[in-house]
Amino acid sequence: MTGPRDQFRQPDHPNDHFILTSVVGSYPKPKWHDRARELFEDEDANFDAAAWEESKDDASRLITQEHERCGLDTICDGEMRRNEMVEYFAERIDGYEFNGRVKVWGHNYFDKPSIASEVEYGEQWLVDEYEFTASVAERPVKVPITGPYTLARWAFVEAYEDTETAAYELAELVNEEIEQLVEAGCKYVQIDEPALAQHEDDHAIVGECLERITAGIPDDVRLGIHVCYGDYSRIYPEMLDFPVHEYDLELANGDYEQLDVFKEHEFTKDLALGVTDVHTAEAESVETIKENIRKGLEVVPPEQLTVSPDCGVKLLPREVAYGKMANMVTATREIEAELDDGTIEVPARSGPASADD
Amino acid sequence: MAQIVATTPGLYPLPDWAKDELSHLKGHQKEDLISGNETGDIATTYARARSEVLERQQTAGLDRIVEGQLRWDDMIAHPLTVHDNVETGGIVRYYNNNNFYRDPVVQGELTPDGDVAAELDAASEQVESGLQAVLPGPYSLADLATDRYYGDDAAFLEAVANFLAGEVEQFPEVDTLFLLEPSLVENAPGDGTDERASEAIDSVAQATDADVVVHPYWGALEEKVYAHLLDADIDAVGFDLVSDHESNVYNAQEYGTTDDVALGIVDGQNTLVETPEELRERIDWFEDQTAGEYGTIYATTNTETFYLPVNKFEAKLDALANAADLEEVTA
C-alpha cells in the first residue's frame, strides 16, 4: 500500500479488503441553486448576498449528504460554490483579469482570464468550502484543487515570460492554500491538471510544480493528481516520480484501450481508476462497473486501487450522476467480498507488479 | 522602401452579442454547428455580425479587409465541413490548442459549392477597396480531413486543391488571397509530399489574379518544405515571427524569399497588446536581418484571432493599423 489511505476506511466497513471509493469533484447543481445564482447576478432581483450564501450552504449540504447516501468512502460537496475550474481560482488570485469569453468549440465559450500582473495570494480559495463541508459530513472530505500548470496554461500569460514560469509562481500559492486546508483538518487533496493531457511533453513542468506544492505538507495527508483525456503513454512511467500518492485517470471513456500502457512498467503508486464514463447519460450497471474495476486489478493490487468516475460528473442529469456513484460503490463492495472469498484473482499480483511499496 | 500593408488572416472572434444570440439560435451540441444552408434568424445574425467586423476593420484603418469567417465553426476545416459530400465525424482537437472541430469525412467528389464565395459577395457590398479572401491552404485542409473517397493521399491532396481552386474562381474581385497553411509546420510533409504540397498551392494560386499570400504559422517551415514552397507561383510567403523568429529569419536568409512577404508580428493568441512602435521594430528587424528589398510587407497577426476576447482583438487591430502608418523607425 502507498500513502495514508487506511484512515478513510469506515469502522463498519463490511469486507476485509478495502478498495477506496471516491469522486473527482464536480456534481450537477440543483436547479434551484442555478436559479439562485441567476437571481443574485440580476441587479433588479431582490436577492442579496446573504440569500446567495444560504443557497450555497444548502446546496453544499445537500450534495455532501447525497454523496454519503451513495456510500462513498470519501466525499466532497460537488463544488457547489464554484463556477468553473479556472475562473473560480482566477477570481481569487491577485494578478488575473478577465477580458471576455473565447471560443472552445462551436458556441461553447470560456471566460479565459489573463495573468496581467504578478500573481499573489488574495482572498482564501477553499478553506471555507472545506470547513463547511466537513462540518456537515460524516465521512472524510476530499478537496479537489485546480493545479498551477492548468491555471497557467488555460490563461493568457502576459506578466511572465512563459507558461512554465507562471506555473511555478502559481504552485507557491497552491502550496499556501493546501497548508491552510491541512491546518483546517483536511487529509485528502487532489490536484487537477487536465491541461497536462493536452501538453504531455510538459510533464516535467508539472512534476516541478508538484515539488513546490507538496513542500512541507505532512505525510499523513493523501495527495493525488487527476488527469483526463490524454495520451498516457507520453507521461508514463515518468509520472510515477511525481511526489503524490495517487493518480486519478480517466479510462472508461476510452474503453480501457490505454490500460496496457500501465502494465509495461510496475505501477508503484496508487491508481484511482475511472470506472464510469461521464459522457454517457446512463448509469452503467453494477456488473459493467465490476468488470471495469477488475481492469484496475490487472494493473495494481486492491490495496493500491481507488475507484472513481472518469472525471467530474457535473454535465450529467443529477439522477444519472447519483446512479453512477451508487452503482460504483455497490460494485466495489461486491468486488471486495469476492476478493475476500478468493473467487476472483488479482492479475497484478502474478505479474511483474508487486505491492511491496 | 517596402509598402507596409496592415492585414489579418481572418477567423475573427464573434462579437459578444452574436455569441449569445447564436448560442440561443443554434445550440451547443455537435449537431448544432453550421450546416452551410442556414436561413432566417441565424443568417440574419451572421450578416449583422459580419457587417460589424467589416466596419471595425475600416475604423481601425487596416489596408486589407477580411470577411471575418464568423460562420467557420470548424475553423479552417470549414469549407469541407459544410460540403454536401462530406460527413462530419467526431469532435477532434484543433492543432495544439484547447479548441475542437468536427472531423470532415470526405465521402464523395469535392465539387466547388460557392460557400466561401457567397460570404465574400456579401462582404464586397460593404468594402469598396482592399477586400481580402481567406482560405485554408490545400495541404492543411487535406491534413485536417479524413478521406473515404479518393483512396490515396496524393489524389486527395490534388482533389482538395482543385476544390479550392474552383471555389476561388467563384470569388468576387479581391485584392489579396491568404492561404492559411499551419499544417505545413505542425505536420510537415515528408519527401515527395512536400513537392506535391507546393504544386497543390500553385494550382490554387493559378485560379486568381489577386496577390496570393501563403501563411504558415506556429513555428517555421522545415528547410526542404520552405524551399519547395518557393517554387510555387505565389506573391508572398508568411513568417510567424511571434512563435519562432530565429528559424523563420534563417529560412529567409538561407533560401531567399518571395518578392513580397507576410510577417506575423502580432500575437493572435495572447491578450498582451503590442504597441505600434514594437510592431514596427519587428518589421525593421526582419528587413535588417534579411537585407531584403521587399515590394510589399503584409503586417499581420501570426494566427487567426478567434482565440482572443473581443476587446483585446480590437486593440490589436488598431495597433496593427497604426504600426503600418508609422514613419520608419531608424535604428
Image (tube, rainbow, N blue to C red):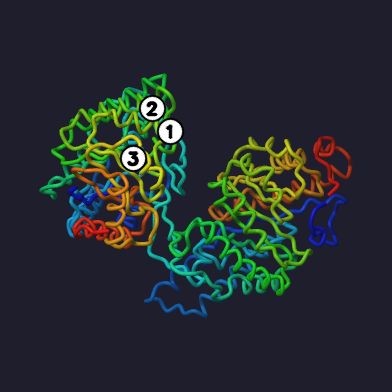
Marks 3/2: CA–CA distance: 20 Å
Q: What is the crowding at mark 1: few (fewer than 14 residues within 10 Å), some, or many (at least 20)?
A: some
Mark earlier in primary sequence (1, 3): 1
Q: Residue at x 46, y 40 (%)?
A: B91
Tag of residue B188: 1
Q: Which residue is mark 2?
A: B194
Q: Amino acid at mark 3?
A: Gln
Q: Residue at x 36, y 54 (%)?
A: B267
Residue at 21% x, 43% y is: B294
Q: Please tell me in which quadrant of the rendered image residue A214 appears.
A: bottom right
The chain under label 3 reads B
Tags 1 and 3 both on a single chain:
yes
Q: Earlier in the sequence, mark 2 or mark 1?
A: 1
Q: Is residue B138 left or right of residue A14?
A: left
Residue A32 coordinates in the image, percent (x, y): 51, 66
Front residue of B330/B294: it is: B330
Q: Is residue A85 visible?
A: no
**Depth order, front residue of A141/B26:** A141
Disc 3 versus disc 2: nearer the observer: 3
Question: Could you say where residue B303 lies in the image, as x and y percent from the top left?
Answer: 35, 48
In the rendered image, the residue lying farthest to the left is B128
Give the camera-side residue of B271 and A165.
A165
Residue A291, horizontal then vertical, whole percent: 72, 38
Q: What number is the disc on residue A301? A: none
Give the SS element for disc 3: helix
Of pointers 3 and 2, the one earlier in the residue sequence: 2
Mark 1 → mark 3, Cα distance in angstroms: 21 Å
Determine the chain carrying the residue at label 2.
B
Q: CA distance from mark 2 to mark 1?
A: 8 Å
Crowding at label 3, few (<14), some or many (≥20) Cα neighbours within 10 Å?
some
Q: Nearer the viewer, residue B87 or B300?
A: B300
Residue to which mark 3 is pinned: B253
